[in-house]
Image (spheres, rainbow, N blue to C red):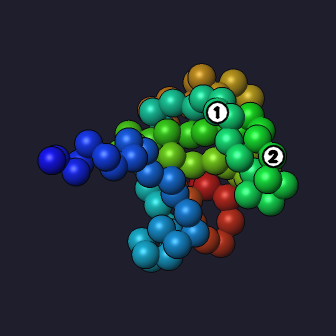
Amino acid sequence: MDMRKHLPNSRWITNADLERRGGEYNGTIRSVTAKMLRNTYTKENQVQPVIRFEDDYELVPNKTMRTELIEHFGWESDLWALTRKRGNLDGPPQ
């Protein structure tokens, strides 16, 4: 059996991923969508924005990241596609 078929089709960017990458991730935004996700703190399902990058990594931006993204690219996330983004452990994407 080809086990690749049973791997998740997306990968989430986590702090552990950033640490393995030397504290930084560089990517180009493919899309921003709303997904129903389980909040690990409240244990409730909530609709959250999910940024998908060209390499299929996904990121749920926190409030600080959302504010920074809006300041840099505007409030309409449909216009963020094909924008290069760098994230690091020290703060929001730049």
SS at badge 2? loop
Q: Nearer the viewer, residue 60 or 25?
A: 60
Q: Is residue 52 above or below residue 1?
A: above
Could you classify mark 2 by the number of other residues whose Cα lies within 10 Å: few (under 14), some (14-19), or many (20 or more)?
Answer: few
Could you classify mark 1 by the number of other residues whose Cα lies within 10 Å: few (under 14), some (14-19), or many (20 or more)?
Answer: few
User: Residue 12: x, y in percent?
Assistant: 51, 53
Mark pair 1, 2: CA separation? 13 Å
Q: Quadrant of the C terminus?
A: bottom right
The residue at which mark 1 appears reads as: 35
Instruction: Tell me the kind of residue under disc 2.
Output: Glu
**Horizontal side of residue 41 vs 55, given as left or right:** right
**Horizontal side of residue 18 vs 50, given as left or right:** left
User: Residue 32: x, y in percent?
Assistant: 58, 31
Q: Nearer the viewer, residue 48 or 86?
A: 48
Please give the name of the residue rendered at 44% of the width and 51% of the height, measured from the top-left corner: 11
**Horizontal side of residue 4 vs 50, given as left or right:** left
Instruction: Tell me the kind of residue under disc 1.
Output: Lys
Q: Nearer the viewer, residue 38 or 69?
A: 38
Residue 45 picture quarter: top right
User: Residue 40: x, y in percent?
Assistant: 73, 57
| Residue 44 marker | 2
SS at badge 1? strand
Task: Please indicate, yes or no, whether residue 46 appears anywhere in the rendered image.
Answer: yes
Residue 50 picture quarter: top right
Task: Please indicate, yes or no, whether residue 71 appears anywhere in the rendered image.
Answer: no
Please give the name of the residue rendered at 79% of the width and 53% of the height, measured from the top-left corner: 43
Q: Residue furthest right?
A: 42
User: Residue 75: x, y in percent?
Assistant: 74, 29
Please give the name of the residue rendered at 74% of the width and 34% of the height, measured from the top-left corner: 47
